[in-house]
Image (cartoon, grey):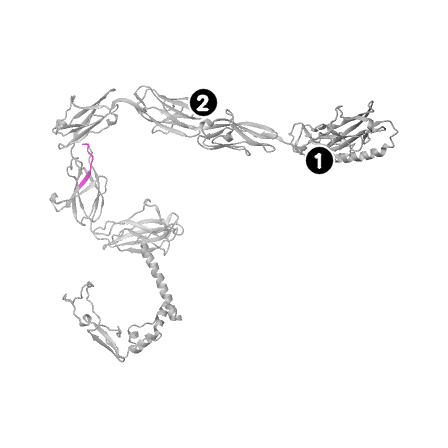
Amino acid sequence: MSAHSGVTGATTLRCTAMLLVLLLTAAKGISASEDPKLEIWPLQPVQAKSVGKSLLLTCVPTGADNQLITGMEWRDPSNRTIPFSNPKEQRPPIYVDQLPGLLSLGLFIPSLTESMAGTYYCSAIYSNSQKLHANVTINTIVSITWKNAPDNQYPIKGRDYVVKCEVVANPPPTIDWMRNGDQIAIGGRYLPEPKGLLIKNVQESDDGIYTCRAGVILTGELAERNIRLEVHSPPEIEPITETLEVLEGETASLTCKATGKPQPTFRWTKQNTLEDLSKADRFRVDHHRGILTMSKIEEGDTGPYICMAENNAGTKEIVANVEVIVKPKIYELINVTTSVHLDTKIICKANGRPAPIVSFKKFGTNDYYVVGVQTSDERIILDHQVNKKDGETIATLTISKTHRSDDGLYECMASNKGDKAYKNGHITVQFPPSFEASETQPPVWSWDRRPANLTCLAESIPNATIEWRLNDRILEIQPGYINIEGTGPTSNLIIIPRANQDYTDYKCVARNVLGTSEHIIELKLAEAPDVIQQTRLLSLTATSITFEINGPPERFGLPMRAFVVQYKDKREYDWTRAKNKTWSIDSPYVIENLLPMTSYDFRFAAKNDVGLSIWGGNQQFDMPKRSSPEPPKLLLGSANEGDIVQSPYADHFELRWKIPADNGEPIEVYQLEYCQVVKVTGEWKEEQESCISEEIKSYENTAYKMNQLKPDTFYRIRLRALNIIGSSSPGEMYLRSARGADTTVHRHEGPALSSAAIIGIVIAGVLLMLIVVDVLLCCCRRQGVIATLCYKKSKQHDEDEAKLGSLYGWRFPLPYCSNKEPTAPPSPAPLPPPVKLASTPTDEKEPLKDSNDRVMIDNSMMRNTSVEFDGRRAHAKTGEIIGKNSAV
């Protein structure tokens, strides 16, 4: 209690004491005849006071002479003397003081507390012999006080809970409960307790507003306390059954889902370290959504992680597993060298997480070997050793009794869920020299002391050394005769044959550490081909002939290079004046530009690198007389003869052909005819009046564009060649045009306009339009640029016309500017005679010349001429400069 309230209480007690003194003085005469005794005022033996109130009890002697009263004092319920107050000290909670004007002793309690309740005693001595006593009992009244009754309380679902409502009051209160305004029936799940209301097995339905009502019957005090009860449930977490697999170096997240009331918050830790991941590098935790985000994942992040969901009702946790996938890496693959017929192994070591699968594949094949014995080759076995804990795999490829074919590159592949890794290793199989690749080598040919190159190639590992032998004697280099280039694995023996004995067998001997091998190469003498035995006529025209030639057998080793023909007029007896023609093998054997109605002799020879055979296959033919040309051969593109050619366009087609033989007279024109046809009962029928005929006049033409086609229509095309003698048989084909409109973009084949030319054309067009518009404005409305220029000088123009007699307007009329019709002057001056130019153009920089190459001297051209007007006539003058009055 504050000092101010203490002073106020003391003042009140003093006023009360003075009032009691007056009352006692008034009663003194009444009680003078009574026995001495002590009275405690107020006179109630039991007094009830509220805690916190102030109290004054006055002990007053009565029925005796006050002067005989001594030793008056107050004692507390513990029989301790209550002290007097000391003005110099702070007053105690209970003290006594002498009241003025009357022998009495007051008991002062400025603020009553519950502990001050009890019986207080007042005592005194009368006449030094008689003890006087009096007592009074003070009962404290405590108002209803809520000691432990929180406004909001949160029980946990499924547990027993006491709704806290602890009430303090004296006299003791009675307590009852209501829920949401309805009285709670005590019993069953609801039981009252000293500190509140017990609810057994709390459920979510127990949510609500609970009213704790306290009442004191003796004092009539009543109080209520509303308590909001919200039932909380502990977290329930969804299980994470699948292991999260994530590639090393990437980012991944784990989501923990939980329900509860209130909504739980989340924490993530790593099980083996119990580290709070919200404070760890590379990790981020969303406490409200339960998401754990891991960045730049490392191999060490593999393991179990704990998710904890927490709220006021409890904590629940689950374990989630993370498996970091580490891309495979091949860290060892050593090349192997072995020899044929030995066993060999090549080993590939790789690591990753999970431990990778490792296999081999020989370079050039498509399939990898499988673990175990290979069905395609039982000599090859693949073995695996897998260490899952360390993520390591060792693959061993064993090859028994190694062959030469086992030599080469082998690709090792390691794969797991993350990726694939590749590395190449080599198995080198050593073997003795071999000439397998040279077994089919043809003989070497030479003639006329031509150098012969005998090449020896020995396959072996390691490389073999080579020596050459003739008749089991080692050949040595002899300049100009024998030369040896290279000693292995390739060696060239170059011989210039000098005699027939040089055309023989030469032995190549190759050896290495594993063995020796020999190979024979034959040097033979080459000769010219045999005579051609047979030729046959294939076709004959007035000016050309085509042969079929069967060449002689290539028994001398050298291939045939060409066939040669000699031909002459049979009236010529000497073949030295015959004409020659050479054909390459398998080309058309055609002779052209022959004379019609002429007899020719033909003979043939075969040619190889040595030379020509003897002439043979003699033939004699009489050329036919001049006749009409051969039929043109139409080019069908990719179509076969007899097929229908499909045009890529709907409205046109470009026909192409080969120039046929003219049979002695030049082709003058081609006749083209194409008709629409339809197929009726398997035969093509022409549609009446659908044929189009055209002439192609140029002999050199081999193409023509047919522009009058209809879409999706069949045509029969006939092309004839004509010369002065007649027309050829037609070259014929069938064509079908494309369907629908032609949407093909046709490229312009002529010279394209440049961008500068296009821009110039556009600008010129715009200027022309502006000029036309300005002229129309000038003529119709006297507006525009021309009208402005003309009418600005109209006055001066009228004056000049008056002076010149309209000569200017006659010579140079301006119909756009003048409103008058131009009229001729009354006496026009004669104009200079026109200049006659020579028929042959001359250079403008030189003077004109006559037919004799002399400079033309014409006074009318060489001298200055002027025309003047005197008001009536115009006068022409020469030798003077044209003046300002000239009409020219």
Q: Determine the image quadrant of residue 192.
A: top right
Secondary structure character of the magenta stretch overall? loop
Circle 2 — which element?
loop
Q: Quadrant of the C terminus?
A: bottom left
Position in image of residue 578 (x %, y %): 14, 44
| 674 drawn magenta | no
Q: Nearer the viewer, mark 2 or mark 1?
A: 1
Above or below, 837 relative to 707: below
Range drawn in magenta? 555-564
Where on the picture, by quarter, is residue 816?
bottom left
Per the rendering, the mark at residue 389 is 2
**Residue 348: percent from left, percent from top:** 37, 24
In the current view of this chain or complex, which residue is farthest to the right? 33
Which one is in front, 876 or 464? 876
User: In the rendering, at what x and y percent does residue 406 appear?
Assistant: 32, 24
Q: Is residue 562 magenta?
A: yes
Q: Is residue 688 visible?
A: yes
Q: Is residue 832 above or below residue 32?
A: below
What is the number of the mark on residue 5? 1
Which amino acid type corresponds to the residue marked 1 in the rendered image?
A: Ser
Q: For the N terminus, which image quadrant?
A: top right
